[in-house]
Amino acid sequence: MLTLDDQKIKFLEETANNIRKSIIESLIEAGSGHSAGPLGMADIFTALFFHIMRHEPENPNWQDRDRLILSNGHIAPVLYSAMAHAGYFPIEELKTLRKFGTKLQGHPHREYLPSLENSSGPLGCGLSQATGMSLADKMDNGKSSGKQFYCLMSDGELEEGNVWEAAMLASKERLQNLTAIVDRNNIQIEGYTEDIMPLEPLSDKWRAFGWHVQKIDGHNFESIIGAVGQAHAEYSKPSVIIANTIPGKGVSFMERKYEWHGKPPSREQGLEALKELRTLEGKIRSEHE
Amino acid sequence: MLNEKLNLNPKIFDEDVERIPIRKGFGEGLLLAGDADKNVVGLCADLTESTQMHLFARQFPERFVQVGVAEQNLVTVASGMAAMGKIPFTSSYAMFSPGRNWEQIRTTICYNDRKVVIVGSHSGISVGPDGGTHQAIEDIALMRVLPNMQVFSPCDAIEAKKITLAIAKTKEPAYIRLAREKTPIITTEDTPLELGKAEVFFAPPMNAKVGVVATGALTHKAMVVAKNLAEKGIAVKVLNVHTIKPLDQEAIINLAKEAKAIVSVEEHQIAGGLGSAVAEILAKHYPVPQEFIGVQDRFGQSGTQDELLEHYGMGLSHIESAILKVLERKNNPQV
C-alpha cells in the first residue's frame, strides 16, 4: 500500500511546499500564531494526508477512515493547510485563521470544524485520546480492524505526565494500530528542550515503556513513509516514530530558532518567506541529499 | 408528611431504616446499563471495588479497562473511546476524578463534546477516617462551571441506580457524585425519576413557611428536621435535587414563591455548590432570604461520619437552626 516512486515523491515535495506557503499566508493574515512547528511538520502532514492515510475529504464521517489525532493543537496552521489542500474545505478559507467566527480557531476545535477528530490545545492529552480510540476499535473488532490511529505530538509536550500514563496503557493493551509521531525539533516556547527539561535518551524511554521505536529524518518522504510502513508491520505493540525535524523548515530566517515557536511573521517577513518558498518548488529535500 | 405520589420509603423515619451506601446503587445501575447497551464501557483507576465498578468489570471483562492509578489518562482515554461510539463510565474517588483531572475533563470531554460519565465516589466529608485529603467537598463546584457538563447528586442508592441507568441514554457529558458510607434509603423502586426534575419529598398540609432545597444523603436529615418542626407547627417543605445542573428552575422558584425563605443543604463547600446555584436563580427571579448548610471554607479531618457532619455544621441541629434563622429573617427583614 505504501509504495513510493520518484514521481510520487516529487508530487509530495511540491504539495508540502504549497502547504508551507499556505501556512505563511494564513499566519500573515492572522497576525498571531505559531510558525516554526507547522513549517517543520509540513512534510509529515503531507505524507499522511496525501499518501498514507485512508480518508475521504468529501465524506469526512466515513466510519472506516484512519484517524489523525493532533495532540499539540498549536501547530494548527499545518493541519488546516493540509486539510484544505486535501479538499476538506476551500483553500481560500485559510485566510480566516484565528479571526472571529472562523472555522479555523487558534487551536483546533471540532465544534467549528466538524471534520476534525478532536479539539486540542492543552498539551499531553492526544496520546490518551488516540489510545482510547484504538482501544474502542479493538473491542469492536477483536484483534484489529485495519483502521490506523495516528497521534501527532510535539517533543516539548512529552514533559507532560499524562503522555506517559497513555504510553503505559497503550503498551499494556498491545495497541498495534496506534502510531505516535513525535516532532523532534528540539525547541519549545522558552528555549531548547534539552535546556528546559532534557528528554534524552528519548528512544530508550519509549522502548522502556514497551513501544516499537524508530528515529527518522522528518523531511525525507521515503523515511517517513517507510517508517509508517514498519509501524503497520509491528503486530505486538504500539509504535512511535521520533521524527527529527527542523523547526521553521523552508524559511531560512526561521529555521532552528526557538524564537519562532510561538509567533507569526510580520507582513514583510511573510512576503520574504513566500519568495523563498516559491523558489523552492520541489526542492526541499532531506538533509542527506 | 411524605409526598404520597412518590412512593417514598415508608420506614424513612424509623430508627431501623435500611442504610446502604449510595455507591452501591451506581454499581448495580452500571451493570443494568451494560446489559441494556453493549456500547457501555467501564474504566477505572485502581478503585474498582471501592467505586462498585467491579460488578460491571466481572460481568463484562471485555468492556472494562483498568488504567491504573492515572486519573488524567482515565478521562482522556474515555474521551477517545466516546469518539468511537462507546458510552464510557469512568470511576475513581471524587477527590482524584474530577479533583485531579479537571482540565482534561474540560478540554477532552466538555470542549470536545464527548459523552463521558465521570463517577466520583467517596465525595463529601463523611468519607471519614481517611481525613481531609480524601474528602471531596469542591466537586460540585468544579463540574457545575463546565459548559456541556450535567451534574447529578443522588440522595440514596436506589436513586443512584436509576440515575446511572438514565444517564447511559443521554447525549451530554455527566458527573455523578457518590458517597462511601451507608446512608438511609429514602426512595423505593417505584419512586419516579426524571433527570432534571426536582421533587418535593416532604410537605406539610399547610403552606410552607420555609423551603429546604437539599441534595445527596443530607436530604434525609433535612426531612427528619422538617418532620420534627411540623410537629411543633412550623411548616417546612423539602425539595430533593438530584440534578444540580441543569437545575430545575421552576421547582425552586415555585418553592421560593410559596415559602419566601430558603435553606440549601449539601455536603459540599458553600461556595459554588447547590446553594450557590439556587441563589443564582433566586437572585434573578425571586429574591428571598436564604441560609446555607455546607462546609464553610474549611478542609475536613479524620473522624466518623456523624462526628464530622456535626463538627462542620451539617447535623440535624444545624439544619434546624438555619431554618429558624431564615424564618426570623423573613419575618423581621431589618434583623
Image (spheres, coloured by chain):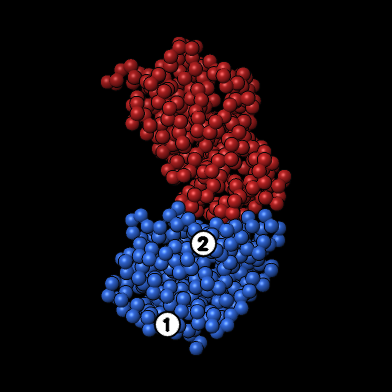
Of all chains, the one bearing label 2 is A
Question: What is the display colour for chain B?
Answer: red
Q: Secondary structure at mark 1?
A: loop
Left or right: residue A22 versus residue B155 is left
Is A21 in front, or is B3? A21
Q: For residue B165, which quarter of the picture? A: top right
Residue at the (50%, 33%) spot, across then down: B196
The circle drawn on residue A281 is 1
Left or right: residue B6 versus residue A91 is right
Residue A148 coordinates in the image, percent (x, y) = 61, 65
Residue that sits furthest to the bottom in the current view: A289
Residue at the (40%, 79%) spot, across then down: A250
Residue identifier under label 2: A58
* Residues tagged by mark 1 and mark 2 found on one chain of the structure: yes
Q: Disc 1, disc 2: CB below 8 Å?
A: no
Question: What is the display colour for chain A?
Answer: blue
